[in-house]
Image (cartoon, grey):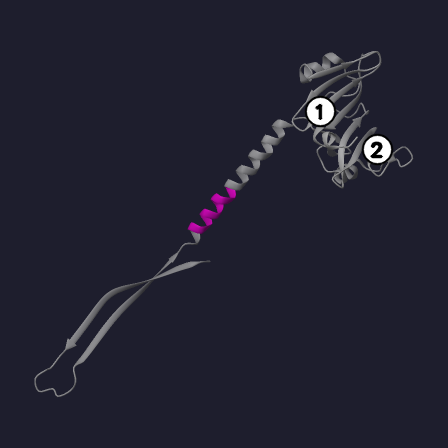
Amino acid sequence: MRKTSIAIISSVLILTLMGCSGDNSANSASSEVSITTVTIDDTDAKAEADTAETKSIEAASNMNTKSAASKNPDASFKCNGKEISVLNDTETTIEDLGTYDPELSYLDEEYKNYVFSDSKVQFDTAMIDGKESPMVLYVANPEIKTTKNVGVGNTEEEIIAAYGYPNNTTESDYIYTLEYHFTSYDLIFDFDGNKEHVEMIRYKNTHNCKKASF
């Protein structure tokens, strides 16, 4: 607890006696000083200042979180009770997805494709600036849904009803995709050969894909 002490001179009395008749002593003087000390407890003021500062920091943090969420509203999906996102770091994503199948996975020095057979999820990474970085998540599990509750098995009409018209469409004899572009990632729905329903969802980290050397 911090306290502030203030010394206040409440009264000063100076008595001076000079050359009194019949006194052969030197001039004499006496003085009396009365000092009162007042202690002010500013603990409450400091606590209020600390509380205000904490609230300010929390408000700024919440604002940043809400801003990031609004820019990337559908960047994650739930799997194994975890929030999986292509915007998370590689180590976190691999740990949250569980054990990958080493026989089906491709693990090169520059590029890796982790296959999680039980979850029907694949995860691509690449070495960028000396660090293994997330690139693309592939979801082929009909039980895994986006935050708008669509996924593998849904029709084109259902996807558009959930997300609106796509930013881009790719179509050929064997490929039909709907692509939605967000600030830091793309959400891509790949349809089957007959273009009847979604057979795979792709979450693409656009920042890392632009930086990758291949």
Mark 1 surroundings: few (<14), some (14-19) or many (≥20) residues within 10 A:
many
Quarter location, residue 138:
top right
In the rendered view, tell whether residue 25 sits above or below residue 83: below
Kindly identify the residue that appears in the image at 41 percent across and 59 percent down.
Answer: 3
Of all residues, the one furthest to the front in this rendering is 213
Q: Which residue is mark 1?
A: 186
Q: Earlier in the sequence, mark 2 or mark 1?
A: 2
* 50 magenta-colored: yes
Q: Position of residue 38 (x, y in %)?
A: 33, 61
Q: Position of residue 207 (x, y in %)?
A: 70, 31
Kindly identify the residue that appears in the image at 73 percent across and 38 percent down.
Answer: 89
Q: Quadrant of the C terminus?
A: top right
The residue type indicated by label 1 comes to Asp
Residue nearest the viewer, comparing 175 with 54: 175
* 35 magenta-colored: no
Magenta residues, as a range? 45-55
Q: Which residue is mark 2?
A: 113
Secondary structure at numbered mark 1: strand
Of all residues, the one furthest to the left in this rendering is 21
Q: Position of residue 87 (x, y in %)?
A: 70, 33
